[in-house]
Amino acid sequence: MVNPDYEELCTFIRLKLRAPRPDHGVDQPGRPGPVESLTRTVNLMSRRHLVMVNMLRPAHTRPVFSNENVASTEEIYHELTGHILWHHLREIEGTFARHGVHFALLDRERLCVDLVSSI
């Protein structure tokens, strides 16, 4: 796998698309490298375009204690791992929000519907 070059994408969009419009890209911002690259360039993009970052919700990503069906110690650790990822994604959401960028976690079953309705 290769990390996407968000800086090149943003340069292309800024040069080729003059009118403000929603811009959609699909990737996995949960990985550290792409998020940092996207965060660096998103401030420039959001000045002229509506930037929306949509990500497929990773499995078991939720706040701790939101699953009432935990029965073993192993499941507790599994839930804690999901909480740590959920917390990290909330931090990313806050970073994007400071730049005026909408960030959403989408479920696989409703991906198309949620993408269309977010515009």
Image (tube, rainbow, N blue to C red):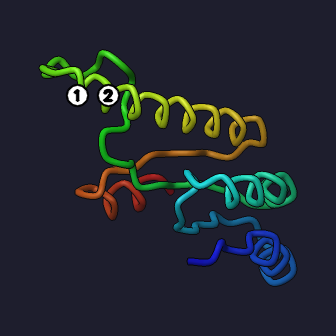
User: What amino acid type should be assigned to the residue bearing mark 1?
Assistant: Glu
* Residue 85 on image: x %, y %: 48, 37
Q: Compared with residue 85, is residue 52 higher up or lower down, i.e. above or below?
A: below
User: How far across and how far down the image is residue 91, in percent?
Assistant: 63, 32
Q: Is residue 45 left or right of residue 111?
A: right
Instruction: Name the element at disc 1.
Output: helix
Residue under pointer 1:
75
Q: Pick whichever, 71 or 117, lies toward us.
A: 71
Picture quarter with the N terminus = bottom right
Q: Within the image, what quadrant is residue 17 found in? A: bottom right
Q: Is residue 101 above or below residue 12?
A: above
* Vertical placement of residue 47 versus 71, above or below: below
For the point 61% across and 38% down, which residue is it? Answer: 93
Residue receiving disc 2: 79
Q: Is residue 104 left or right of residue 59?
A: right
| CB under 8 Å between discs 1 and 2 | yes
Tag 2 secondary structure: helix
Q: Which quarter of the figure has residue 115? A: bottom left
Q: Residues within 10 Å of mark 2 (few under 14, many from 20)?
A: many
